Amino acid sequence: GDDSLMLGTNVLIPDSNSSVSEDTMKKAKKNRFCKGKRDRYRKLVERLIPVARSNPAMFDLEAAAPLPAAIASSEELKMKLRATVMRLALASDSEDFEVEQL
């Protein structure tokens, strides 16, 4: 019967021990930047936070540090980076801060 049509297809059988399916895990991995890019972004944010803390009202993202080309060419990414830096700079006055992972 129709069983011959099922040969060669991958059928996901959920594992009763896991709460997250393989498809969900694969999708989450695809949306994540590589470790090197995440590390470079984190280091950039960490370099910008002290500059933003020193004078939040006059903080100029582009003058504070050289930006990667992908960020420098996109107004949306610059706004997002600035918002992240300002949020972290104003959130904590101590030096113990943790940059969120992308």
Image (cartoon, rainbow, N blue to C red):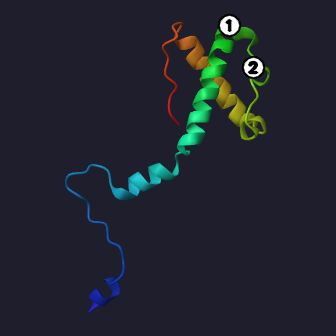
Mark 2 Cα within 10 Å, few/some/many (few <14, many 20+)? some
Rendered position, 4 above or below 47: below
Tell me the residue at 57%/41% (across/down). 36
Q: Position of residue 40 (x, y in %)?
A: 61, 34
User: Hey, which quadrant is residue 67 in on the image?
Assistant: top right
Marks 1 and 2: in contact by CB < 8 Å?
A: no
Q: Position of residue 22 (x, y in %)?
A: 35, 57
Of 3 and 59, the residue lying toward us: 59
Image disc number at residue 64: 2
Give the position of the N terminus as an image quadrant.
bottom left
Q: Amino acid at mark 2?
A: Ala
Q: Position of residue 101 (x, y in %)?
A: 50, 33
User: Hey, which quadrant is residue 56 in on the image?
Assistant: top right
Q: Position of residue 72 (x, y in %)?
A: 77, 35
Mark 1 Cα within 10 Å, few/some/many (few <14, many 20+)? few
Rendered position, 57 above or below 70: above
Tell me the residue at 47%/50% (across/down). 29
Regarding mark 1 in the picture, which secondary structure is present there? Answer: helix
User: Hey, which quadrant is residue 45 in on the image?
Assistant: top right
Tell me the residue at 69%/35% (across/down). 77
Of 59 and 98, the residue lying toward us: 98
Task: Name, please, the residue furthest toward the bottom.
Answer: 1
Of 64 and 75, the residue lying toward us: 64
Lateral position of residue 22 relative to residue 78, left or right: left
Image disc number at residue 54: 1
- Pick whichever of labels 2 and 1 is earlier in the sequence: 1
Q: In whole angstroms, how far apart are the C-alphas of marks 2 and 1?
A: 11 Å
Q: Amino acid at mark 1?
A: Ser
Task: Name, please, the residue furthest toward the left.
Answer: 16
Tell me the residue at 27%/87% (across/down). 3
Of 39 and 11, the residue lying toward us: 39
